[in-house]
Image (cartoon, rainbow, N blue to C red):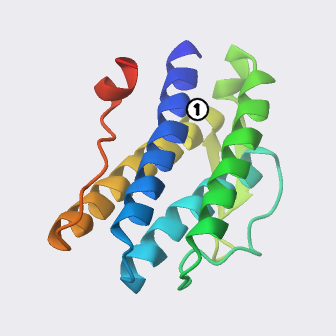
Amino acid sequence: MKTIKCMMDHLYWADGRILDALEESKTKNKDLLKLVRHVAVAERVWLDRLQGKGSGQYSLWEETEDLLAIRTMFEENAEQYRVYIEGLKEFELDEMIDYENQSGVPFRTSARDILLQVLLHGQYHRGQINRALRIESAEPAQVDYITFTRL
């Protein structure tokens, strides 16, 4: 549990760093903004599934230009994940969660694997966002886990 908590703390930090880099770049790249919104919405989708709620109301891929709304979503996600994880007992990580994907297909996955999905999915896309920032000659965000641990 300690490892997952540390990794989630890294996720909250890294999400904030990516948003800061996007704001500083003043990018108008619609695909890039769509991608960062996707990360925020995916975090929310998985949290709702962990909490036994449906997630069909979310659209994972929408265009946006509102970084403030995305930041708010990330902040709300972080707060809700903190509450969820604080209330989680070690044995509950291996409990199976029944849910449907965005297309309505049923799945069953452990809470541990869902949390790992959230962590790895975000890191994957933060790498894509940083690459796009570099292509735009903007400064990418340092989001490596080891950098986070040195704080």
In the rendered image, residue 53, in percent from the top left (x then y), is placed at: 83, 56
Q: In which quarter of the image is the C terminus?
A: top left
For mark 1, does the 10 Å Cα neighbourhood hold few (<14), some (14 to 19), or many (20 or more) residues? some
Q: In which quarter of the image is residue 144?
A: top left
The one nearer the camera, 53 or 67, is 67
Rendered residue at 65%/53% (across/down): 46
Q: In this view, does 113 lie to the left or right of 89?
A: left
- Of residue 70 and residue 40, the one placed in the foreground of this image is 70
Q: Where is residue 116 in the image (x, y as percent from the top left)?
A: 49, 38
Residue with the mark numbered 1: 112
> Foreground: 60 or 16?
16
Instruction: Decide if residue 39 is on the left or right side of residue 75.
Output: left
Measured as percent of width and height from the top left, residue 41 is found at 61, 64
Q: Nearer the viewer, residue 74 or 24?
A: 24
As displayed, is residue 137 above or below residue 44? Answer: below
Amino acid under label 1? Arg
Q: Is residue 14 above or below residue 64?
A: above
